[in-house]
Image (cartoon, grey):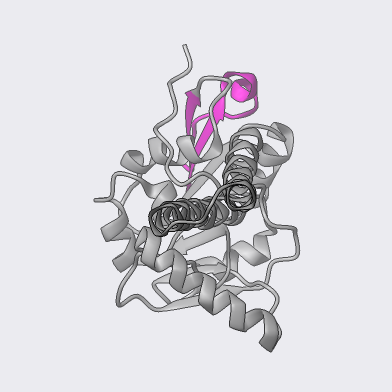
Amino acid sequence: MNNIVLPVIDGFEQAAQFIKNIKRDDCKFFVGTTKAGESYFKNSKKVKVFIFADKSKKEEIINSLASELDDGKIIVLRKLISSQELDLFISSQTDITLCATKKLNKFCMFFNKIWRKIIKLLFDFTFFEGDVSVVALGESAALVARNISNLSYATRVNRWKGMSQSSVKVASKPAKKEYSKFKINTMLIGFVGLFVGCVAATAVYFIFEKATFLAGVLWACAIFLSLLFMILAINIYLLNVKTGKRLFKKAEKGE
């Protein structure tokens, strides 16, 4: 059986029509929607509906649906695709299948590799070679995923080892990433400002005060630490833009 995980927090009518258009008998939809979308979906042999609070995020819903899935493949749909595209994900023979992305040129590829190494060093994971708007887990990967507490995280960042991967061309744009723009922008501006402030303060200090070895070491340490914090903030910012907020809890059930 192919378990189709479909979190729906908007576009309820389109999502309901999408399910109706899928005529396969080997698919079961696990639809997680908010109270606002409750009237658009009904339980049936091929659809199991779960209602969550109106402010729930897609990633929170994905985590909540993980424990409800049956044996077989898992296909996480963060966006709607065509029935033909869904068929390609289902028929894929690799352990993990994602949406294909445009190939980077050599210049961008060089810096992308460096960034991936930094992310691996800081967070102990790397990125999938593709877009995670739709992710299909073969039976072996799905078996592992059922024992992971955070299905959202497992299908957005690559901590998998020994699993084959492939991609499918999808016409629609990538799904929007879920994160707080205000929080990450504030964090980034704050740490960039801290670094600039340390450099400026050091310059002003040595203009008006006599240079000593101890003062030089202290100001050098301050600049170095602020630089590290700025690098970390930049990587957290880019991480949010690429995959969304790192960790999500489970969605609250709708009353």
Q: Position of residue 185 (x, y in %)?
A: 65, 41
Image quadrant in which the N terminus is located? bottom left
Q: Nearer the viewer, residue 82 or 241?
A: 241
Q: Residue at x 34, y 39 (%)?
A: 68
Left or right of 173 on screen, residue 250:
left
Extreme residue in the top direction: 255
191 and 99: which is toward the camera: 191
- Please check the rendered image and state whether residue 122 is part of the magenta-colored stretch, yes or no: no
Front residue of this view, candidates 43 and 138: 138
Q: Is residue 252 above or below residue 91?
A: above
Quarter of image, res 191: top right
Residue 194 in view (yes/no): yes
Measured along the vertical axis of the image, is residue 76 above or below residue 115?
above
Please identify the quarter of the rendering in which residue 55 is found: top right
Residue 124, x across and y down, in percent: 34, 63
In this picture, which residue range is highlighted in magenta? Answer: 28-51
Is residue 155 found left or right of 15 in the rendered image?
A: left
Residue in the picture at 42% in, 77% down? 94
Residue 29 on the magenta segment: yes
Q: Position of residue 121 (x, y in %)?
A: 37, 67
Query: Across the whole image, how many numbered discs are drawn on residues?
Result: 0
Is residue 24 visible in the rendered image? The answer is no
* Residue 163 in the figure: left or right of residue 244: left
Instruction: Name which residue lies at 44% across and 73% down.
Output: 117
Q: x, y percentage for residue 40?
A: 65, 27
